[in-house]
Image (tube, grey):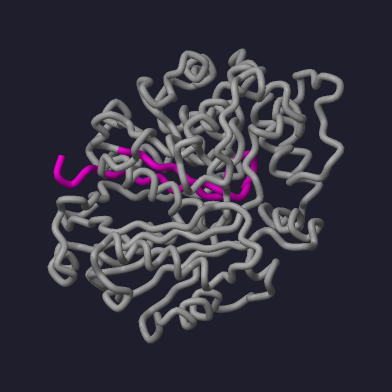
Amino acid sequence: MSDSKIYIVGVGMTHFGRHLEASISELLDTAILRAADDAGCTKAAVEAVYHSSATQGFLQGQTFVPGQVALSKIGLTGIPAFNIENACASSSSSFHLAVQALKAGMQDVVLAAGVEKMNVPDKARMFAVFDGGWDVETPEENAKRLLQLGEGVAEPEGSESERPYSVFMKIYAAFGRNHMKRYGTTQRQIAAIAAKNHQHSEHNEYSQYRQPYTIDEILSAPPITYPLTLPMCSPISDGAAAVILCNEEGLRKIGATTSRAVQVMASAVASGNPARSADAPERHVARIAAERAYEMACLSPEDMDVAEVHDATAIGELMHAENLMLVPIGEAGPAAERGDFTIGGSIPINPSGGLESKGHPIGATGLGQIHELVTQLRGEAGKRQVDDARHAIHENSGGLIGIEEGVAVVNIFKRANA
């Protein structure tokens, strides 16, 4: 990144969960007002908005200008507003573009915001939204290619849910079985990740689920598809999150200091490669983004004190701990079982509770992760605080291209006064 310093000065989010009575604009306004209050400014200070939503067109019929529609109801009009859809990485992509705008000098104070209302009365339609997460012209070919990854690992009798679930859970299960086949990873190790995240979420007031689980309780929970059980999977969620960023001129404009600011050290994006083989995990799209981010930040995996990664299932955390090079390829399972990823361990991952517990309103997910890391770097996370957190890494990915995610975003943050 250039010499221009970029800061996060305000973060805000709603509780993630079921918001059946709240409108999209109400959820968005709550998150934005909290971010503005956190930054010590008003909404009027914002000079541009990067808005993300992935499901509004399908579920609510707002196919065009969803950001402008929602923002016009809450007093943010007249300024540039951009709508970003990048599957589960939508709001992290919004964040990335906000950073680029500041570095280009287009604006000095910008807002990245994301919102989603995924709980709708038509349950079949609610799950069908995920069908667009890959090439819709070749769904059978997509499924065959991805599910082949899980072949060679026996699925115990009774390990398949009779209730409907997202096709992405079946894909994650295939990723997990492939990891088991290659590296000896066990279902218990995957359950250790889920148990850890549910225990972390007990202390997060924004989490959809706050009930702690033991590893054995995770394993004995209702099955989804082997090796996944219900608590290993993220729920359907509603919610919003917002982040206010500025450059040094922006700090002056809003009268802020760096005392609680978090500096953006790197923001990197990579797109999936349909030609990548499962025999080349070191070229995974998230690893490529991570390599770029570490180079931008002039930092290494050993410098990271805390991480938030995309765990639509516990298998996601397993994979991305390795993609971020926080542990060597193939060693995330034993590391999880040892407690390395737990608060107090060698590299705490998902102290928020992760998507499995905190929730996964697609268009707000990435900014919700950033909210947690900013809170950690400020030392304001209470009972889930990671000791002396100075550097943090964030990974958020989504969609499917070939045998990997269609897009991955990796950000690195530093406590500004560290």
Residue drawn at point x = 14 percent, y = 67 percent: 255
28 sits left or right of 34 in the view: right
Q: Nearer the viewer, residue 52 or 220?
A: 220
95 sits left or right of 305 in the view: right
Q: Which of 263 and 76 is in front in this view?
A: 76
What percent of the width, then of the height, locates residue 85?
54, 63
What percent of the width, then of the height, locates residue 11?
35, 57
What percent of the width, then of the height, locates residue 376?
32, 40
Q: Quadrant of residue 218?
A: top right
Residue drawn at point x = 61 percent, y = 60 percent: 19
| Position above or below: 18 against 165 | below
- The span picked out in magenta is 392-418
Residue furthest bottom as drawn: 78
User: Number of marks in the image?
Assistant: 0
Q: Nearer the viewer, residue 324 or 199?
A: 199
346 sits left or right of 237 in the view: left
What percent of the width, then of the height, locates residue 231?
65, 33
What secondary structure prevails in the magenta region?
strand
Magenta span includes 82: no
Q: Nearer the viewer, residue 300 or 212?
A: 212
| Position above or below: 173 against 67 | above
Residue drawn at point x = 14 percent, y = 44 percent: 417
Q: Quadrant of residue 349?
A: top left
Magenta span includes 395: yes
Residue drawn at point x = 52 percent, y = 16 percent: 337
Indicate the quadrant containing the C terminus: top left, top right, bottom left or bottom right: top left
